[in-house]
Image: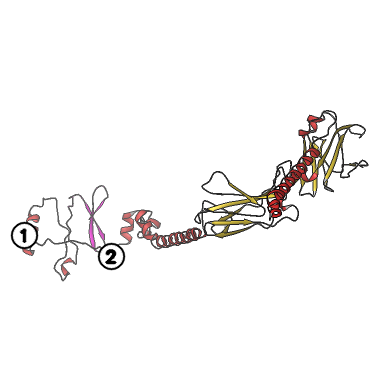
Amino acid sequence: MITHFFTVFCVIPTMRLIFQAYLMIFILSNLVASQSQSSGGKNATNITIINFNNEKMQITWAARHLFPNENVSFFYTFDEGKNKVLKPCTTYLLDQDYNSGCLFKTEGPTLAISIRNSNGSEELFSKNLKADFYIKPSPPENVTFFWEEDTVTVSCNKPKRNAWCLTLELQYKSKFDKEWQSRTSKCCSIGEQGFDPRKCYSFRVRLRRRVPSCNVVEYSSDWAAETFWMSSTLLDSCDDGITPQSKTVIVLSCLLAVLLIMLILLILLCKWQRVQMSILPAIPDPKYPFADLFNYHNGNLQEWLDKNGHVVLQTKLEYEEPESITEAESQQEDGKNSEKQGPFEKIFTFPGAAENNDGKAPEIACLIPASNTTAPFAGFHMLMNDDMYVTL
């Protein structure tokens, strides 16, 4: 009983403290190993080190600031111990034709670099570091979204190496948000609540390297492809919140508008002649009823009348007899009018008018000057005055 009590209250806390102390020593040793060991007084902050997913190393330096007017050369090695063999850089990064970086394959956990003059005889800068402390992870792969009411769960594939050093960062925003909302969780799943199923959201995720337990620099992966969701429906984009249902309504409205326009055009085409006649009425051409007058007589009315006296003119005289006037009163008024005619007036009556059976044949009276001459026309006698005008 006493032994069990001693183990619980003494041994276990002591082991925990020893483990924490060992972890701190490990981290500090890596930090010290990653610090620069430079010659020539060059500033290590002008050197950028990136280990791309522990596959490829990229070392860059401020060439114009650190080594003005000098094209330097770069050497590196992943060997440990005293017998290190430096390798020359084969792929340089250039800045205005000056060497400003080197790209090479990651071959081990430790790295030693050396920057020298152009011929490699003089060392200008050197540094020993832990390559594992400068890892920039790759973007998350196979990102999936699971929706359940107002909760979304995002997950991705778990990396094969050191997944505990990574955190998954989720950012999202709706069309009403100006800034991204950010959430982080351990790799490789994260859940968030409070999503409105009526809104369209933009999502993006990336992996981040833990600092300082795994990295001395807080490197994050590039963002995975941005996706757009409304509830559990994947959309191409959040274009002003247009949903598939509203797109269908818009298409149907456009079709109805086109059909309505076609119907209006058909109605206008059917009534075009009537509309044209009301707007621009046709003006009759007098040359067709009197073709002989203009073609053969050059507009000479007297000559045309002499040669076409046998033509019978069809004249329709329309009149209305007042209802309050009887036939006897009409005859009395005609008699009174005949008495009032002057010595230079005479009544001219169309022949054949008395033969009308309905007894309502009209009489056309013309005032004829005494000095006029008579011209025959279709059985009628027309008078021409001194000015050569025809009077009916």
Left of 184 or right of it: where is 104?
A: right
Q: Would you say residue 139 is visible in this rendering?
A: no
Magenta region includes residue 375: yes
Q: Which residue is mark 1?
A: 332
Q: How crowded is the residue under tag 2: few (<14 C-alpha within 10 Å), some, or many (20+)? A: few
Q: Amino acid at mark 1?
A: Gln
Q: Would you say residue 244 is visible in this rendering?
A: yes
Residue 23 position in % (x across, y down):
75, 45
Residue lying at the far bottom in this picture: please name it: 357
Q: Nearer the viewer, residue 369 or 266?
A: 266
Q: Which residue is mark 2?
A: 312
Q: Nearer the viewer, residue 191 or 87?
A: 191
Using the image, determine if residue 73 lies above or below residue 223: above
Q: How is the image coloured?
A: secondary structure
Left of 32 or right of it: where is 241?
A: left
The residue lying at 15 percent from left, 57 percent from top is: 347
Residue 68 position in % (x across, y down):
82, 28
Q: How crowded is the residue under tag 1: few (<14 C-alpha within 10 Å), some, or many (20+)? A: few
The part of the chain drawn in magenta is 364-392
The tally of labels here is 2
Residue 89: name its quadrant.
Answer: top right
